[in-house]
Image (cartoon, rainbow, N blue to C red):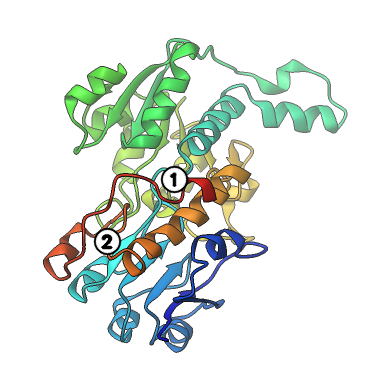
């Protein structure tokens, strides 16, 4: 009996129990791997029917060597590890999990916002070093009435916009793809990127990483910002030109930053951001809760099951142009695997 070979190219979890639960089928063989390079991916996956991918590179070179692959499912929202054009041309569906951590990332962005503006980290470090004096946090400005600028207005920043309403923040956003009607419904003003940067007291970055968005917050945008403004990033590090951000922080062009993501992860020990008192850093943790992790892993596996077991396009199909190259059934609206999460 032929079995579908499903390779998990790499993962950083204690086990694969959620993936195994969803793909527990007599026709599926789940093969764990820990690939780091293109060569390792090719060796493990050249004859695979499907891949579940975290960080391992799925480049054009890799995709052209895949002999049987029908679907690549990516843990999480971003698909920057996968060459979408190459996958599409080869008739490979690419799936992600766009809705597993909306609250978590919005909550983390809000936590960074409050921690920076209320100088929580500075105060904590001062008290623990024996200094009990509120003046170590000066100056602190009142939050009510300030402008939160959202770079991107997808699902996560929409959730964040709702969460900050009770704080009395005015919310503006830049997103060339967001309908004005949606922004009006959410009580958010859509503006140009330049206007957003010049108006924001807190600039929160939520744009996905792509060729179009890489470095979109750079010298020109930072030069427009208020000297009292801060930058928060919970999307992907390269969306911000890190060298320009560092210079803006060092010269006082902006007041500070709170970053969950950086250009190179883990952050190198010689990165100047590590030595800046006006910067808060967290280790790409915004996505995480126990519930979100379980949902992400199960839904990534569901994307594989949709294609292999049910002959459907994945529910969360990213490269919709692949429909020109491969014919599958449209995804059914019901969630077959809700009980497995």
Residue toward you, 70 or 83:
70
Residue toward you, 118 or 36:
36
Residue at 42 percent of width and 34 percent of height: 204
Q: Position of residue 50 (x, y in %)?
A: 38, 74
Compared to residue 106, the image places residue 294 above or below, namely below
**Horizontal side, residue 214 vs residue 28: left or right:** left
Badge 2: few (under 14), some or many (20 or more) residues near its Cα, within 10 Å?
some
Residue at 58 percent of width and 39 percent of height: 279
Q: Quote the CA–CA distance across marks 1 and 2.
A: 44 Å
Residue of label 2: 312
| Mark earlier in primary sequence (1, 2) | 1
Residue at 16 percent of width and 67 percent of height: 327
Where is residue 124, by image quadrant? top right
Residue at 85 percent of width and 33 percent of height: 129
Q: Position of residue 74 (x, y in %)?
A: 41, 61
Q: Secondary structure at mark 2?
A: loop
Residue of label 1: 245
**Horizontal side, residue 323 vs residue 264: left or right:** left
Badge 1: few (under 14), some or many (20 or more) residues near its Cα, within 10 Å?
many
Where is residue 120, by image quadrant? top right
Q: Position of residue 107 (x, y in %)?
A: 53, 31
**Horizontal side, residue 41 vs residue 19: left or right:** left
Task: Tell me the tag on residue 121.
Answer: none
Q: Secondary structure at mark 1?
A: helix
């Amino acid at each position: 009996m032929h079995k579908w070979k499903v390779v998990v190219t790499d993962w950083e979890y204690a086990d694969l129990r959620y993936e195994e639960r969803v793909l527990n089928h007599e026709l599926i063989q789940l093969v764990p791997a820990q690939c780091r390079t293109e060569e390792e991916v090719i060796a493990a996956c050249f004859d695979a029917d499907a891949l579940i991918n975290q960080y391992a590179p799925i480049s054009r070179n890799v995709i052209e060597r895949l002999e049987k692959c029908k679907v690549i499912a990516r843990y999480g929202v971003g698909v920057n590890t996968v060459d979408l054009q190459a996958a599409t041309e080869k008739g490979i569906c690419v799936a992600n999990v766009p809705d597993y951590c909306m609250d978590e990332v919005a909550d983390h962005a809000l936590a960074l916002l409050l921690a920076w503006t209320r100088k929580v980290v500075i105060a904590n470090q001062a008290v623990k070093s024996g200094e009990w004096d509120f003046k170590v946090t000066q100056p602190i400005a009142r939050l009510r009435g300030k402008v939160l600028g959202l770079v991107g207005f997808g699902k996560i920043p929409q959730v964040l916009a709702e969460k900050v309403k009770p704080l009395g923040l005015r919310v503006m956003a830049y997103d060339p793809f967001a309908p004005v009607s949606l922004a009006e419904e959410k009580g958010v003003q859509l503006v140009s990127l330049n206007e957003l940067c010049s108006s924001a007291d807190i600039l929160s970055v939520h744009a996905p990483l792509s060729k179009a968005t890489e470095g979109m917050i750079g010298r020109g945008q930072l030069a427009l910002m208020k000297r009292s403004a801060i930058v928060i990033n919970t999307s992907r590090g390269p969306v911000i030109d890190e060298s320009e951000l560092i210079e803006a922080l060092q010269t006082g062009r902006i007041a500070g930053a709170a970053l969950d993501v950086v250009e190179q992860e883990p952050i190198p020990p010689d990165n100047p951001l590590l030595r800046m008192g006006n910067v808060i850093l967290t280790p790409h943790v915004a996505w995480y809760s126990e519930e979100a992790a379980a949902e992400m892993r199960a839904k990534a596996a569901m994307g594989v099951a949709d294609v292999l077991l049910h002959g459907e396009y994945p529910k969360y199909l990213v490269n919709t142009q692949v429909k020109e190259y491969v014919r599958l059934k449209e995804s059914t609206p019901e969630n077959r695997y809700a009980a497995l999460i």
